[in-house]
Image (tube, rainbow, N blue to C red):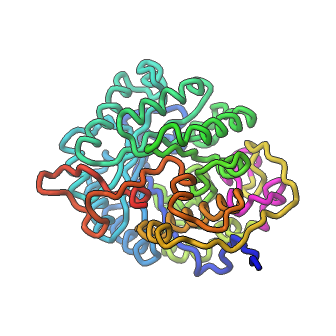
Amino acid sequence: MEAARSLSFPSSHGEYRPSLVSWNLTRKCNLKCPHCYMEGGTAEENELTTEECLALLDEMEALGTEMLILTGGEPLLRRDIYEIAQTASAKGMWVVMGTNGVMVNDFVARKMVECGVKGVGISIDSIDPEKHNAFRGGPNAWEHSVRALEICRRHGLEVLVQTTVMDMNRDEIPELMAFARKKGAWSFNLYFLVQTGRGQEMNDLPAAATDTMLREMAEAQDEYRPMLVRSKCAPQFKQIAYDEGLGGLESGGCMAGTQYCRITPGGDVTPCPYMTVVAGNVREQSFAEIWTSSPVLTDLRDPSRLKGKCGACEFNELCGGCRCRAQAAFGDYLAEDPACLYQPTGRTLERYDIEWSPEAQRRLDRIPISFIREKVRKGLETYADRHGARRISAGLMQEALAGMDRSAPSFSAASAKPPDSGVIKEPVTPERLI
């Protein structure tokens, strides 16, 4: 007899950890993008010092942080950026750098590799250089970003192309995805605008347009293999992929406050970069105290506290709705996500015990980052449930993990370091280890 299974939400603070941290190291920036949630430009007064940053890395290590995004503003404008990156990498964290690319050259790329940086996120918002330059506020911003992409790939760094979808570029998204894949991007990440920071003055896509775009992305996952196609700030992607019977269920879902948080240049901890609600400040409390006891984070860890459609939705543990968009729209981070069109049915999702084939289990176990491994596991089991499968095989993994490259890398995660030439031919990334 098949036993019912549930994707249970952790029941105690001890079961949560900040597996993924996005760290805005500075507000200083050499561009002035109209949608910037940080309102980047000049440095924030009294930003965390090098010593404070290094001490905070010790706390992250103790709490189990596995992946660290170093961003800004423009993180390369901090003189201690390489020291911070190298220290985090030495502690076993997978370090990703978020940059506009203007300052990236061969020297910078070599330094990133030497410091153990695994990937670089580069923003490209239009296939048209003039349109991108006008939006980003730099005369040669597009050329710099594309050059940075090419330089990083030449030095073996994986590149994530980051695009914010708006009315001005929504018709260009297929071209941008094709361009990113042609340039060798590991992932194409499409961000759905949250009206915060300077973005408060911009119009978010209407809910119907967001839904259409997400369905197109779900369909595009296989087309752009092996590049990953991912939505950001639109966790309802999971509901749509489930509804369509498509892969990609291992991606998406709001992690704000449960596995993810942001640290600002001045030390504020927020559940997500786009959320202004402050859980605490690392100069006033330890990071551990904030993470384990903040009332804001406690709220976000209990899906029964969600309101409106999100509270009633059978997908609220898989999706959860965008808490930042709820905050921006209603002033309440527990409110329903206004960008989601789905109407809850009131029925719970059927789940049953799933058997894993030895090969599938081995491939899952090869993912070195535990929170990604767990997301992949839950995504695959949900995909199996959706299709009435009771056994996960290597073939089902191939089908369900849309966009992932299944080939083994040329060196293992345990020895992931550049060969003598200083150029990595096949970088190790968590999802490429499958």
Q: Is residue 272 magenta?
A: no
Q: Position of residue 148 (x, y in %)?
A: 30, 36
Say which quarter of the image contains residue 109.
top left
Along the viewing direction, whichever of 363 and 277 lies nearer the viewer: 363
**Could you tell me which residue is drawn at 34 percent across and 58 percent down?**
408
Give the mark count: 0
**Could you tell me which residue is drawn at 36 percent across and 71 percent down?**
55
Residue 419 located left or right of residue 63 = left
In which quadrant of the rendered image does the N terminus lie? bottom right
Residue 258 visible, this orientation: yes
Q: Position of residue 355 (x, y in %)?
A: 61, 73
**Could you tell me which residue is drawn at 88 percent across and 59 percent down?**
346
Along the viewing direction, whichever of 113 and 382 lies nearer the viewer: 382
Residue placed furthest toward the left: 420
In which quadrant of the rendered image does the C terminus lie? bottom left
Q: Which residues are magenta?
A: 304-331
Residue placed furthest toward the top: 130
Q: Position of residue 238 (x, y in %)?
A: 66, 52
Q: Is residue 330 magenta?
A: yes
Along the viewing direction, whichever of 288 and 408 lies nearer the viewer: 408
Residue 319 located left or right of residue 136 = right
**Could you tell me which residue is drawn at 58 percent across and 51 percent down?**
248
Q: Position of residue 341 (x, y in %)?
A: 79, 42
Residue 46 visible, this orientation: no
